Image: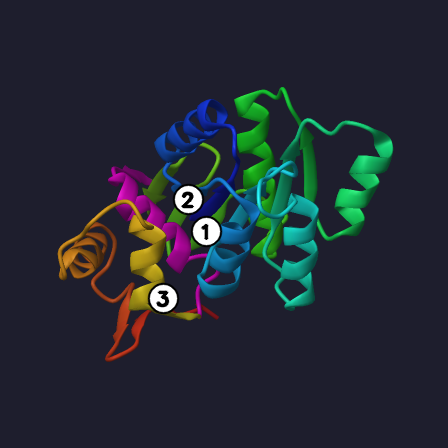
Amino acid sequence: MRLLLIEDDVALGEGIHQALGREGYTVDWLQDGSSALHALLSETFDLAVLDLGLPRMDGLQVLRRLRDSGSNLPVLILTARDATEERIAGLDAGADDYLIKPFDLAELKARLRALLRRSAGRAQMLIEHAGIRLNPGTQQVSYQGEPVALTPKEYQLLHELLSPPGRVITRDHLMQLLYGWNEEAESNTLEVHIHHLRKKFSSDLIRTIRGVGYLVEERR
């Protein structure tokens, strides 16, 4: 999952960036509203964590312009503005959740998991498909009842392909998901991860759509 963190407090931003990175998220971080809006409108993310008191453009303005563009990207507002009217304004502007600073990292992670489940149309946490059982809360994966050890990148890739299956996902999207802005990758890195997943599960789990990307087919 690729997240955009929009937070101008450097110490807080670094802490969130590191904590979510350890959870397996690909986290890109910006510190002003104008740059954030440009990124949100031009790139693909699974979720945004948005501060309100930002330089160059207030977070509420960023959110309103994002929603005016037609985007339904899940957005969690993370702010020190705790007045009831502030919360109402944030939710009315299109936020999906609102968390007040200071906060507990465990709660932030739980809220992000809930937003991602909701955006994928799942009420339950577990993802089950073709003998695979994936638990986003614990990041544990099993196949035909046996635990499977995955690297963080393999886990991210499998999670995306199964959320939900039946979608052709482009190579560019998957590379952005896995590496964001701050990591460099070899040209064949994605293919190597796909190869490893096929070996750990099934050779026909992931179809290559030549010239486009990859697909895990729905099971009927």
Percent coordinates x, y for residue 86 in the rendering: 80, 36
Which residue is drawn at the image coordinates 46% and 46% (left, top)? 3
Quick one: label 2 or label 1, which is nearer the N terminus? Answer: 1
86 or 121, which lies in front? Answer: 86
Q: Is residue 149 magenta?
A: yes
| Residue displayed at 85% across by 32% down | 84
Q: What residue type is labelled 3?
A: Val
How much space separates mark 1 and mark 3, taking CA atoms?
13 Å
Amino acid type of the residue that numbered disc 1 sits on in the rendered structure: Glu
Tell me where residue 55 appears, x and y as whole percent: 58, 40
Label disc, if present, on residue 128 of the rendered structure: 1
Give the residue type at disc 2: Leu
Chain part drawn in magenta: 146-166
Name the element at disc 2.
strand
**Above or below for 88 versus 16:** below
The answer to whether residue 74 is magenta is no
Residue nearer the viewer, 136 or 104: 104
Label 2 crowd bin: few (<14), some (14–19), many (20+), radius 10 Å = many
| Residue 196 disc label | none
**Whether label 2 touches label 1, CB < 8 Å:** yes
Please give the residue where the numbered disc 2 appears in the rendered image. 134
Q: Nearer the viewer, residue 47 or 122?
A: 47
Q: Where is residue 133 in the image (x, y as percent from the top left)?
A: 41, 46
Relative to 92, is 72 on the left or the right?
left
Around disc 1, counting alpha carbons within 10 Å, would you say few (fewer than 14), some (14 to 19), or many (20 or more)? Answer: some
Q: Position of residue 199 (x, y in %)?
A: 17, 54
Q: In this figure, which colouring scheme has been used for the structure?
A: rainbow
List the residue tagged with mark 3. Answer: 216
Q: Is residue 58 left or right of residue 139?
A: right
